[in-house]
Structures are given as structure tokens and as C-alpha cells.
Amino acid sequence: RATACEGLMSGSPPISASQIWAVGTRSLTRLNGQYNFEEFTANGTFTNPFTTSGIVFVTICGGGGGGGAAPGNPSVGDGGFAGQIIVSRPVTVSGNVTVTIGAGGASATVGTDSSFGSLTASGGHPGATCTASDVSTVAVNTVARAGTTVYHAGNGERGIGLGGLGATSGGTVGTAAAANTGAGGGGGWANDATDRAGGAGGSGYCLVEWWD
């Protein structure tokens, strides 16, 4: 899952929603300037706050991938991948900027990219589907063993919030990730002929910070 959290230092855990959103509860000063921020949880426009141009710092994530579907008996879905997270990227703005918040992917579907102008955070990939013949190659989030009847659907990968939970019993669907987390959806688990869907990935998010 090396591509899921590009923009973070290698080996660093994804930042949590509380780490990002808590900044909105306090007023900071830097270089004798007033701290400002704007959050985007849906598509919108960032209005240039400067007289001409200036630098803002953008944290943005793409929509999470949907959890893997479970078609038929028996099969499990792995958890979806989180959308790419870019943290505090400096961007020069000289006019209004279009902000796009990516949608989370539906079951077994890739998440949509989020963007701040030309700065783009990619959507996450969906979880894989694992059947009785290939459970030995299942991804890390799924507990499954070849040649046995032990199956467990995978949890979605964490974004800026927790991923959706994988189905915990046969014949159930995966749980969707929360909105604006960019996290992956949980995988489904089929133990009969009925297909079980993976949960949807969480939609993206964008935080813009600047000092005036």
C-alpha cells in the first residue's frame, strides 16, 4: 500500500481527523500574522484572501476505495485502499481556486481524485476479492488460509479517519467508511450463492491554511 499515503514521510502513520480538524478550534499567530483556515467537505471555490497573491498550505486527500466484493460461495473481500493524503503543501494563489472533493468508491470501485487547483490527491483503489482457490494470496488486512474454511473480510485502510470494518460473519456486507476521511471501505463476506458487497470508501477532504 505504498501509494496510499504519498506526501507523508516514509514509515509515518496517517494523520488522524482530530489532528487536522482540531486546528480549527484555536487562533494562532505566525510572523505577526493572523492564522486563518477554510475546510472543504464538498466541491467549492477558495476565494483568494490576498490583495494580489500569497501562499496557502493545503492538506487534501482523495476518496477512499470501496471494499472488495464477495461474489458467491465462499469468498471474502479485502478492505479498500485509502485515498492519497498530501499534507501542508505550500501553494501560491493569485486568484480564486476551484476545489473538488473526491467521492468514495462504491463496492469494488476506485475512489475519485480530490483537487485544489492543479494539486491533486488520487483516489484509493478498491479491495481485492478472494475465493476459496486463491485465499493464500489475500492482502494483509484479510485473515484467510488456503485449504481451510477460515475466512474474514478485511477492514478498509485508514485515511485521515478509520476505514470501514470488514464483514464479521458470513452472508454480510462490508461497512462504509465515514465521509470526509478518505478511508477505504470494508470487505464483504459471502457464505452462500448470494453476492455480498464491500462498503463504500469515505469521501475526500481539503483544509486550506494561511496567515495574513
Image (cartoon, rainbow, N blue to C red):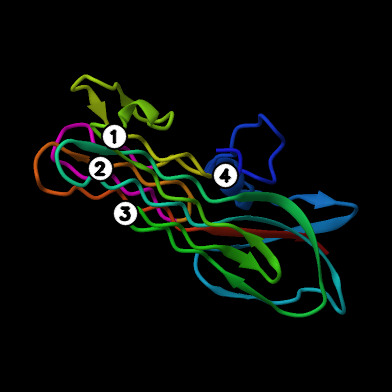
Whether tag 2 and tag 1 are in contact, CB under 8 A, the answer is yes
Instruction: Give, as a three-letter code, the residue at label 4.
Output: Ala
Mark pair 4, 3: CA separation: 18 Å
Q: Is residue 1 left or right of residue 95?
A: left
Kind of residue at badge 3: Ser
| Prevailing SS of the magenta stretch | loop
Measure how far apart labels 1 and 4 are at the Cα level.
20 Å
Counting from the top left corner in percent of width and height, residue 189 is at: 21, 38
**Mark 2 = which residue?**
188
Q: Which mark is residue 153?
A: 1
Q: Which residues are magenta?
A: 164-179
Q: Secondary structure at mark 4?
A: loop
Place residue 206 in its image quadrant.
Answer: bottom right
* Residue identifier under label 4: 4
Could you tell me which secondary element the residue under label 3 belongs to? loop
For the residues bearing labels 1 and 4, Cβ distance under 8 angstroms: no
Q: Amino acid at mark 2?
A: Gly
Residue 53 is situated, as x and y percent measured from the top left of the image, at 86, 74
Mark 2 closeness class: few <14, some 14–19, many ≥20 residues within 10 Å: many
Q: Residue at x 41, y 55 (%)?
A: 179
Amino acid type, residue under disc 1 in the picture = Ala
What's the mark number on residue 64?
A: none
Return the residue at label 3. 107
Determine which quarter of the picture holds residue 104: bottom left
Q: Is residue 95 above or below residue 69?
A: below
**Vertical comparison of 125 with 115: above or below:** above
Residue at 38% x, 40% y is 79
Q: Please tell me which residue lies in front, 189 or 24.
A: 189
Label 1, secondary structure: give it: loop
